[in-house]
Image (tube, grey):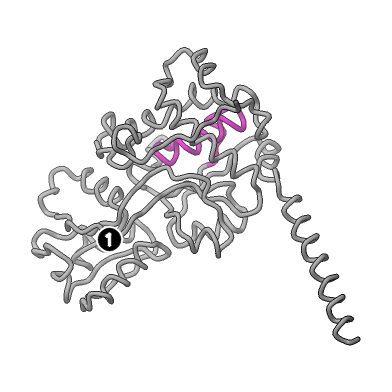
Amino acid sequence: MAGLVEMRILIVLGVFLCQSLTGAWADSFGQTKEQILSRGYLKCGVGIDDTGFSKRNIDGQWTGFDVDFCRAIAAAVLGDATAVDFIPLDSSNRLDVLQREHIDVLFRTTTYTFKRDMTLGFDFPAITFYDSQKILAHASENIKNLDDLAGKTICANLGTTSLTNISAILEKHDIPATILEVSSQAGRWRAFFGRECEAVTADGSDLFARITNQPFYQDNFTFLNEELANEPLGPVVRDGDQEWVHIIRWVINFMVLSEHYGIGQTSDLSSLAALKLPSGKKFGLQDSWAADVLNQVGHYGEVYDRNLGEDSALKIPRGFNKLWREGGLQYPLPMHLD
């Protein structure tokens, strides 16, 4: 009899828990978008002085690859790509700021990992940039491979997969090197250029962009051939608001899709009809969402080229970020309803 009572209690508790969780998820569905519409602008977390990705110029204007994706989301939701409050964040506090709801979305060269997605309460709607972790060293140190790091100091940022990866690699290969953990990108570069460390490790695009910005000193540095880890980068949001996840996912997918069809910022927007896109109401937007994104920001290739590629000072090859038909990994999902 006692066992039957205990079973009934467990069933009641289980039903209560399911109802509570369902209610919590229902309460949060659409909440982020409604907050944005109410305040009139998007709060977007970006990097601090992150060359090519997010940088504020002398006039206070933000530019960069991640910045443009923030603007694309604002254009889709608000019809205005300029309606963005950019919140500069470093690698050690970015996820905490997102979790505390101080920003709506994080576009800050953040790596999509199982731990962050499944155990920390975050969601990654899309991958905007396929990167890999690299090591940059002072050429005078004659560091050619991982074994040459023995006895050296390597700079890495706190709160990053780069720090986790380099620690694991040094341990795996039994390389007696020291890791200098630095809280910010600026601090990491100061330590490296100040010779507090002989090498620095981070996303390859980060290292390449900074050294490209110092053309007179490029020969003073050398990249190791090893690619330490895959670094798929993309936007991050809090778990629970699936409408918000869908909006970001499909806005980014649309930007890749429109590049695939050759429909860009200067195209006749009537050509969008050929894509048979779903109405904005299908995921909580105005019907002009796609035209607003394309007209005010552009497609994926245009965003890449002006910030990182051919039309920028960096001229970083697209590599894995080419469209799939050109040998890359950017592959648009179908968006038509028929």
- Residue 66 magenta-highlighted: yes
In this image, 271 relative to 6: left or right? left
Residue 7 seen in render: yes
Q: Amino acid at mark 1?
A: Leu
Q: Residue 310: which quarter of the image?
A: top left
In this image, 251 relative to 146: left or right? right
- Image vertical order of residue 269 relative to residue 47, above or below: above
Q: Residue 24: which quarter of the image?
A: bottom right
User: Over which residues does the magenta segment extend?
Assistant: 62-85
| Residue in view at x 13 percent, y 48 percent | 217
- Residue 10 percent coordinates (x, y): 81, 75
Instruction: Mark 1: give few (<14), some (14-19) or many (20+) Cα within 10 Å.
Output: many
- Residue 176 percent coordinates (x, y): 21, 78
- Image vertical order of residue 107 relative to residue 137, above or below: above
Location of the C terminus by quadrant is: top right
- Residue 204 percent coordinates (x, y): 28, 51
Give the secondary structure at mark 1.
loop
- Residue 25 percent coordinates (x, y): 72, 53
- Image vertical order of residue 283 relative to residue 214, above or below: above
- Residue 308 magenta-highlighted: no
| Label tally | 1
In this image, 48 relative to 220: left or right? right
Residue 79 seen in render: no
| Residue in view at x 34 percent, y 69 percent | 181
Location of the N terminus by quadrant is: bottom right
In this image, 190 relative to 224: left or right? right
The residue tagged 1 is 228
| Residue in view at x 41 percent, y 22 percent | 261
Q: Residue 315: which quarter of the image?
A: top left
Front one among 2 and 253 = 2
